[in-house]
Image (cartoon, rainbow, N blue to C red):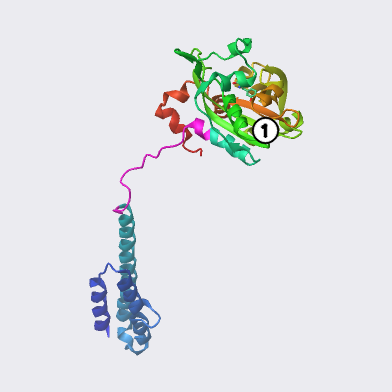
Amino acid sequence: MIDEVKKHLKAVEAFSSKEAEAIESFRVSYAGKKGILNELFAAFRTVPNEEKKAYGQELNALKSAVHEKVQSLQGQLYSKSKQQKIQDPTRTPFPIQTGNRHPLSVVKNRIIDIFSQIGFTISEGPEIEDDWHNFTALNLPAHHPARDMQDTFFIQTNPDILLRTHTSSVQVRHMEKNQPPIRTISPGRVFRNEAISARSHCIFHQIEGLYIAKEVSFADLKQTLQYFTTALFGNSKIRLRPSYFPFTEPSAEVDIYWGLETETDFRITKGTGWLEIMGCGMVDPNVLENCGIDPERYSGYAFGMGIERIAMLLYQISDIRLFFENDIRFLNQFKATL
Ligand code: DAH
């Protein structure tokens, strides 16, 4: 009997496999319910008394040999499968450098999203404009002093052709081609002959909004702006300050309440807690008429904002030039945004 146990012990010690299935069937054949160990333990009764002690010892040795063998083979199997994972040949060998949207596009898209949810469509116009669409139709005839508000790049050989100074030119084009109801926003690049500094650039971006229908009121304008600022900045208080634009009457400047908690708040709001974010007003009847819309039947509002300014507020960027330098260290910081 003892010899049989010893034979098994040798067989167990000699056993080796790298296959999970073979290891499992080895385990079952020895340690399973109907396995060899149980069989040998059951045979204990039949062993003569003087051999019982030695038999018992051999049997226990066999039992531990079986457990140790199973454990060590399974352990190897596990660490091998872990290694295999690390050496997965299908894995990309280095992290992929993915690109991301420019922060100005991110902000522009967010603004577009917010207005498309309330039915605004997108319209675009040319960056090289004529005097009519950029100025005259907008109630800024030749020699109007308000033209000075927007330092203009003219084409030297033809003073009628210029780089648009604002996206308001697109509302003129849109009204000329469409009859009310009109509900559109126009994002685009604009140009002004200004010295480049941390706060201003000669190239920047604006979004223009225009709504023309029957009986549109200033209250509608305020409501829309409140909806917009809440969607973009979170729960925000706004105020409308009387202002002047030749193409709107009355005109207003929109401020949002930024807060006065930190030193930065104090600095960027000049100690008032309020920040100017756009211009707006009721479209001047002259402008409607210039664009072929009957001001007796229709009224409307318009607004215009600088995308850089909004982005600088949203992301706390202190220098407008960063948007145009394309420094990868700056651009990479917007990876997480859409
Ligand atoms: N065009 C103006 C600018 O560039 C912004 C603006 C103000 C647009 C009032 C509007 C508006 O449509 O109603 O400064």
Establish if 112 lies above or below 58: above
Task: Tell me the amino acid under the disc marked 1.
Answer: Tyr
Percent x, y of residue 35: 36, 81
Which residues are drawn in magenta? 87-106
Question: On the rendered structure, is 245 left or right of 86?
Answer: right
Pick whichever, 260 or 244, lies toward us.
Answer: 244
* Residue 94, picture quadrant: top left
Question: On the rendered structure, is 311 left or right of 49?
Answer: right
Task: Residue at 50% x, 27% y: name it.
Answer: 126
Which residue does the numbered mark 1 point to in the structure image?
Answer: 211
Question: Where ligand 1 lies, by image quadrant?
Answer: top right
Percent x, y of residue 111: 59, 34
Task: Residue at 53% x, 21% y: name it.
Answer: 130
Q: Is residue 255 visible?
A: no
Pick whichever, 262 or 170, lies toward us.
Answer: 170
Can residue 231 be found in the magenta stretch? no
Main SS class of the magenta portion in the image: loop
Pick whichever, 94 or 154, lies toward us.
Answer: 154
Question: On the rendered structure, is 102 left or right of 89?
Answer: right
